[in-house]
Amino acid sequence: MSLSSPPEKNRPIVLVLGGGNALGSYLAGAYEHLQQRNVGPRWIVGASIGAITGAIIAGNAPEERVPRLREFWEQAKIHSGFAPNRDSSIRHAYNEAHTALALLLGRPGLFGHRFPGLLSMLPWMPSDVALYDHRPLRETLERLIDFARLNRGDIRFTAICVDVETGEETVFDTAREEIGPEHLLATSAIMPVFPPVEIGGRLLCDPGFTNNMPVDVALETPPEEDTLCIAVELFSLKASRPVSLDASAERANDLVFASSSRRSIQALQREYGLREQIEPNGSSVTLLHLAYQSGSDERAGKAFDYSPASLRDRWAAGMRDMEHALAQLADARREAKRLNVIRLDPHMAAATAAAGARASA
């Protein structure tokens, strides 16, 4: 295939979606722009909220995918009645208040308090392994996802978990096995916030601390034909210097969750470089990498900020970032390599985040 051809129209597409809890509305916006461009993935690989997003996409007919994603985030939203823009002087306090409300009250259809939970730290209380119960999410998933379609539809779907006892990565793939709601609960069970889930005798949890954007799973085996891999993660290695304790905590959190994707991509570049020496005429992969750049109003608790304004702004940022990324992809001069990595300009993504949803109004 000629490198001048539009790759999103002519190559099979793999979509990799990372984890990040309430930041996941960015993934929904990114997918909505892909759908508007009639760009459809052949395979979706996800972790945590990325897996849930991918399952909603793969488990619904094309015309139902964005409405189902909107329904998911509408249910998750804390309906406080107003949504200030990112340049509002009260926006940071607004975000912090909604984060506190989510942690205090839980979210209907997503998670709630468990007993003894936090109280297990007190003397004479029974032991517990998590703070919240995310079993309410199961009913939501069963309502929004057609699991028969998910397992036998046109889109291959893969969810990543980690075995709590061995630390080994566990991969569930509709090409090999049936995936149900319990697999999605397992991939989103970030410890110790949510309890791990036992499947087939293994105790499984969210892979966020080890592999939050599993691009290596998608590209571990070189594809048989030229492929476009679009990887979208919710934490960024790029950010401005922190100027407060809260900002420092946010930066540390981002570095923990984003570092694994850098190592994975670097390892893939080395591996594909070796393959290129052995088989220079083999199939090629173009990896288009997007990372959500948090707005200046967001801090360490952003992954539990379900405020209307934040969910709206992240969705809008996802749409605009995907638009910019596809334009950058079309303009990029790709070398004749087995693996070409194209990253969305982080300065452009930061400007998108700062603009919030107003730029889409």
Image: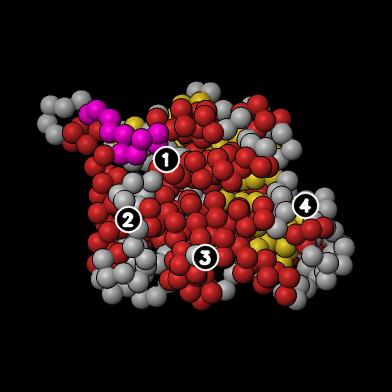
Q: Which element carries disc 1, helix, strand or loop?
A: helix
Q: Are marks 4 and 3 in contact (CB under 8 Å)?
A: no
Magenta highlight on residue 216:
no
Q: Are marks 2 and 3 in contact (CB under 8 Å)?
A: no
On the rendered image, what quadrant is the N terminus found in? bottom right
Q: Earlier in the sequence, mark 4 or mark 3?
A: 4
Say few, some or many: other residues with alpha carbon within 10 Å of mark 4 (under 14 / 14 to 19 / 20 or more): some
Displayed quadrant of residue 280: bottom right
Q: Report the residue at 18% width, 33% height from top.
A: 119
How far apart are the alpha carbons under marks 2 and 3? Answer: 18 Å
Q: Which residue is mark 3?
A: 360
Q: Nearer the viewer, mark 3 or mark 1?
A: 3
Q: Earlier in the sequence, mark 1 or mark 2?
A: 1
Q: Is residue 92 visible?
A: yes
Which amino acid type corresponds to the residue marked 4 in the rendered image? Pro
Q: Report the residue at 31% width, 34% height from top.
A: 112
How far apart are the alpha carbons under marks 4 and 1? Answer: 33 Å
Q: Nearer the viewer, mark 4 or mark 2?
A: 2
Please provide percent x and percent y for residue 298. Answer: 35, 63
Please provide percent x and percent y for residue 218. Answer: 66, 49
Q: Report the residue at 73% width, 70% height from top.
A: 330
Q: Which region shows up in magenta?
A: 106-116
Q: Nearer the viewer, mark 4 or mark 1?
A: 1
Q: Is residue 164 visible?
A: no
Which amino acid type corresponds to the residue marked 3 in the rendered image? Ser
How far apart are the alpha carbons under marks 4 and 3? Answer: 29 Å
- Numbered mark located on residue 75 in the image: 1
Q: Which element carries disc 2, helix, strand or loop?
A: loop
Q: Is residue 118 left or right of residue 52?
A: left
Q: Earlier in the sequence, mark 2 or mark 3?
A: 2
Please provide percent x and percent y for residue 67. Answer: 56, 43
Q: Which residue is mark 4?
A: 12
